[in-house]
Amino acid sequence: MSGSRRQWRWALAAAAAITLADVLTKEAVQSVFNYGERLPVTSFFNLVYVMNPGAAFSFLAGAGGWQKPILLGFGAVVAGVLAVMLVRNPMDRLTAFGFALVLGGALGNVIDRARHGAVVDWLDFHLSGWHWPAFNIADIGVTGGAAALILGAMFFAPEKSSPEGARS
C-alpha cells in the first residue's frame, strides 16, 4: 500500500504543478498584454491574450453565456472525480501520470472560469494564415494526459486472461 500512497502523492503534486504553472503564466500574460494584443515570436508562433468562454477549440464560445456555469461545473466535477480516483485506486504510473495531467489542466481552467467566466488563452500557432485555436498550459495538460491514458490503454494495459476452460 505504501507504493500506491507515494503514487497518489506525486500525482497530486504533479497536478498542482500544472495548475500553478497555468495560473502563473495566465497572470503574466494578463499583466503584460492588453486584451486582444498579439506579439509575433516566430514565423509560426505568437503570444496573444484572448479569452475563451467556450470549451476546447472554442467549442460553444458563441453560445450566449448559458455554457459558462455548465463548463465550470463540469470541470469541477471532472477534477474531483480524478482526484478521488488517484487517491483511492492503485494504478500504473502512466495512468496516474495521465490522470495528474488532466486533473492539473482541469483545475487551471476551472480557476479561470470561476474568476473570469472564461479561460485565458495565450499560445497561438499558425501557418500560412491558418491559426490553431489559441490555448494555454492547462490545455496542454489535458491533451497530454488524455494521450498518456490512450497510449497506456493501447500498449501497456495488462492482458486479460481468458476464463479457465475457454478455448481460443
Image (tube, grey):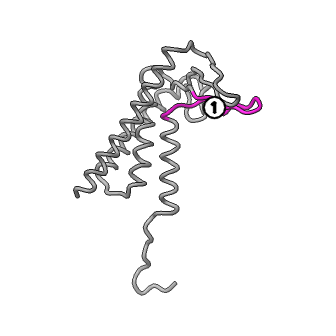
- The quarter of the image holding the N terminus is bottom left
Which residue: 56% across, 31% down? Answer: 135
- Residue furthest toward the right? 128
Is 127 included in the stretch rendered in magenta? Answer: yes
Is 121 included in the stretch rendered in magenta? Answer: no
Which residue: 42% across, 21% down? Answer: 115
Where does the image place residue 82, in percent across and percent down from the top left?
Answer: 38, 45
Q: Amino acid at mark 1?
A: Pro
Q: Is residue 158 above or below residue 147?
A: below
Q: Which residues are magenta?
A: 123-138
Where does the image place residue 138, in percent across and percent down from the top left?
Answer: 48, 34
- Residue furthest toward the left? 2
Q: Nearer the viewer, residue 57 or 15?
A: 15
Where does the image place residue 94, in percent across and percent down from the top left?
Answer: 42, 54
On the picture, is 89 further left or further right than 40? left
Where does the image place residue 112, in percent across and percent down from the top left?
Answer: 45, 25
Q: Nearer the viewer, residue 40 or 103?
A: 40
Q: Which residue is mark 1?
A: 133
Q: Nearer the viewer, residue 59 or 132?
A: 132
Q: Is residue 86 above or below residue 118?
A: below
On the picture, is 89 further left or further right than 106? left
Which residue: 53% across, 29% down? Answer: 67
Q: Secondary structure at mark 1?
A: loop
